[in-house]
Image (cartoon, rainbow, N blue to C red):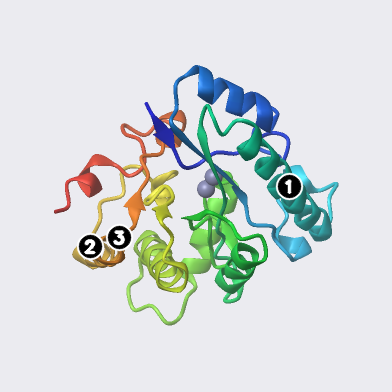
């Protein structure tokens, strides 16, 4: 496998492992040609910290991101004869200002690229654990604007609508784990309404020239395929 555009390190992310430099040395050993460093955008509200971050404050996340960029740029230079490293971020879509916060960071640090991802619906994480997914689902079922009395349908629709907004605002070169919303509902059958949203999002990305990552985290959570699942890969 010669390239990857999505990675996290234990040095700068609570849910990953390994020092950034060790990860890069391993990527070189495995003959990667291009390797993208894409730590998460900092989150700015205390309620958006994950349980594993309970000892931190939002300001700590901003400081950590700054340290990440500094270290990533140092390593980019140090290993440039062996590997092309890209320094970027993975976006968030928690509130209506999340995408502009990401754009501000991209400008502030002159980042090389973006992984555009959605991890929240109704300001609730959908891929962290089942408990939080169920909370997001319950918020979807009480969403009065929806006619359908089908929480899954609503949640999936809201996920792909949020993704569409993120795509329009950021136009990320890489779209992260396109259908991660399937994590705890692998057998949910997409209705025509959901397929229309999926196809709309795919068309949008294709039109501006973005790429869809193949994200092996899908295997880790027991899905039959990496993200996106093969029915989405087959959309033409
Ligand atoms: Zn990620
Ligand atoms: Zn992600």
Q: Earlier in the sequence, mark 3 or mark 1?
A: 1
Does 162 sit above or below residue 179? Answer: below
Instruction: From the top left corner, tell me how far across and down residue 12 is, in percent.
Output: 72, 41
Q: Which mark is residue 70?
A: 1
Q: Nearer the viewer, mark 2 or mark 1?
A: 1
Mark 2 within 8 Å of ligand 2, using the beta carbon: no
Residue corresponding to mark 2? 199
Q: Earlier in the sequence, mark 3 or mark 2?
A: 2
Reading the chain from its start, which is encountered first: label 2 or label 1?
Answer: 1
Q: Residue at x 30, y 60 (%)?
A: 209
**Mark 1 within 8 Å of ligand 1, using the beta carbon:** no
Q: Residue at x 38, y 29 (%)?
A: 2
Residue 13 visible in the displayed image: no
Please tell me how crowded label 1 is: few (under 14), some (14-19), or many (20+) other residues with Cα within 10 Å: some
Spatial CA distance of label 3 from label 2 is: 15 Å
Q: Label 3: state its secondary structure.
A: loop
Tell which tag, 3 or 1, sits nearer the viewer.
1
Q: Which residue is mark 3?
A: 209
Q: Nearer the viewer, residue 219 or 24?
A: 24
Where 64 falls versus 204 (above or below)? Answer: above
Distance, label 3 to label 1, CA atoms, is 29 Å
- Eyeballing the image, is 167 above or below 96? above
Q: Residue at x 41, y 56 (%)?
A: 173
Residue 149 is situated, as x and y percent measured from the top left of the image, at 36, 70
Mark 3 neighbour density, 10 Å: few (under 14) some (14–19) many (20 or more): few
Q: Quadrant of the C terminus?
A: bottom left
Badge 2 vs badge 1, beta-carbon distance below 8 Å = no
Which one is in front in this view, the residue at disc 3 or the one at disc 2? 3
CA gap between label 2 and label 1 equals 38 Å
**Element on which disc 1 rests:** helix
Give residue 131's position: percent from left, percent from top: 59, 48
For label 2, the crowd category at 10 Å Cα-Cα, with few meaning under 14, some 14 to 19 and many 20 or more, is some
């Amino acid at each position: 496998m010669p390239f990857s555009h999505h990675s996290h390190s234990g040095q700068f992310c609570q849910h990953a492992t390994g020092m950034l430099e060790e990860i890069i040395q391993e990527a070189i050993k495995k003959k990667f040609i291009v390797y993208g460093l894409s730590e998460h955008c900092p989150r700015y509200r205390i309620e958006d910290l994950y349980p594993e971050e309970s000892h931190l404050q939002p300001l700590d996340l901003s400081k950590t991101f700054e340290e990440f960029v500094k270290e990533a740029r140092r390593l980019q230079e140090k290993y440039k004869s062996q590997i092309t490293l890209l320094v970027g971020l993975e976006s968030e879509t928690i509130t209506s200002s999340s995408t502009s916060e990401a754009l501000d960071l991209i400008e502030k640090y002159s980042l090389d690229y973006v992984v555009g991802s959605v991890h929240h619906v109704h300001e609730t994480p959908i891929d962290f654990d089942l408990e939080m997914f169920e909370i997001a689902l319950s918020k979807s079922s009480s969403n009065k604007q929806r006619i359908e009395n089908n929480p899954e349908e609503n949640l999936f629709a809201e996920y792909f609508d949020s993704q569409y907004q993120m795509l329009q605002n950021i136009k990320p070169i890489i779209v992260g784990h396109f259908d991660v919303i399937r994590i705890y509902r692998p057998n949910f059958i997409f209705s025509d309404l959901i397929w229309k949203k999926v196809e709309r999002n795919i068309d949008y990305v294709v039109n501006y020239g973005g790429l869809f990552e193949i994200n092996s985290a899908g295997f880790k959570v027991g899905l039959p395929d990496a993200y996106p699942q093969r029915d989405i890969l087959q959309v033409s």
